[in-house]
Image (cartoon, grey):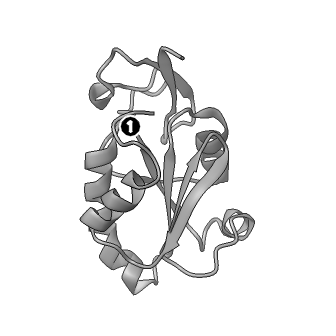
Amino acid sequence: MTQENLVVCTKCGVVNRLPLSRNGADAQCGKCGARLFSGVPQDVDTANFDRQIGRGSLPVLVDVWAPWCGPCKMMAPAYEAAAKALEPHVRLIKLNSDKEQAIAARLGIRGIPTMILLHEQREIARISGAMNTGQILRWVGSHIPIGTS
């Protein structure tokens, strides 16, 4: 079993080694100095999305959304609250389907909001429709053990 997690910075895309013995909540990127877990899911571009999925060792929860989507806007605070509860054990990111159409197509997005849970470059689960914080936490917890990675 590995003694560290590989955590991709959502700001600069650099892969950081984070020992399991260290509290990830206060960890910073070794390159840009940004907090690795801010409790605020970041919008990622194609390159950062691919690095999160391909290089990070944490499960990744992706919220696929668009700025014009009412249910997406309604769910945003719940998704942020879920990030505060799930980090640093799960990486939460946002993917704007208008800006990142190629990834949305690659993921087979048919409606938004859609959340996709990925780990080790594989899709574990997906669900469409707005959810509250409790529903998000229960859904993630039903697919992966929360608190471990």
Q: Quadrant of residue 96?
A: bottom right
Q: Is residue 70 visible?
A: yes
Q: Is residue 91 left or right of residue 125?
A: left
Left/right placement of residue 115 relative to residue 98 reads: left
Residue 88 image position (x, y, % from top left) = 35, 36
At label 1, counting other C-alpha atoms closer than 10 Å, the crowd grade (few under 14, some 14-19, many 20 or more) is many
Is 100 situated above or below 13? below
Residue identified by numbered label 1: 89
Q: Quarter of the image for the C terminus: give it.
A: top left
Q: Position of residue 75 (x, y in %)?
A: 33, 73
Q: Amino acid at mark 1?
A: His
- Left or right: 108 as drawn, with respect to 64: right
Quadrant including the N terminus:
top right
Would residue 17 be seen by someone viewing this image from the given angle?
no
Judged left or right of residue 104, residue 11 is left
- Residue drawn at x 55%, y 60% is 125
Relative height, residue 16 to residue 13 (above, below): above
Residue at 61% x, 68% y is: 99
Instruction: Report which quarter residue 26 is drawn in.
Output: top left
Measured as percent of width and height from the top left, residue 116 is found at: 54, 61
Look at the picture and state if 141 lies above or below 72.
Answer: above
In the depicted view, which residue is nearer to us: 9 or 110?
A: 110
Label 1: which secondary element: loop
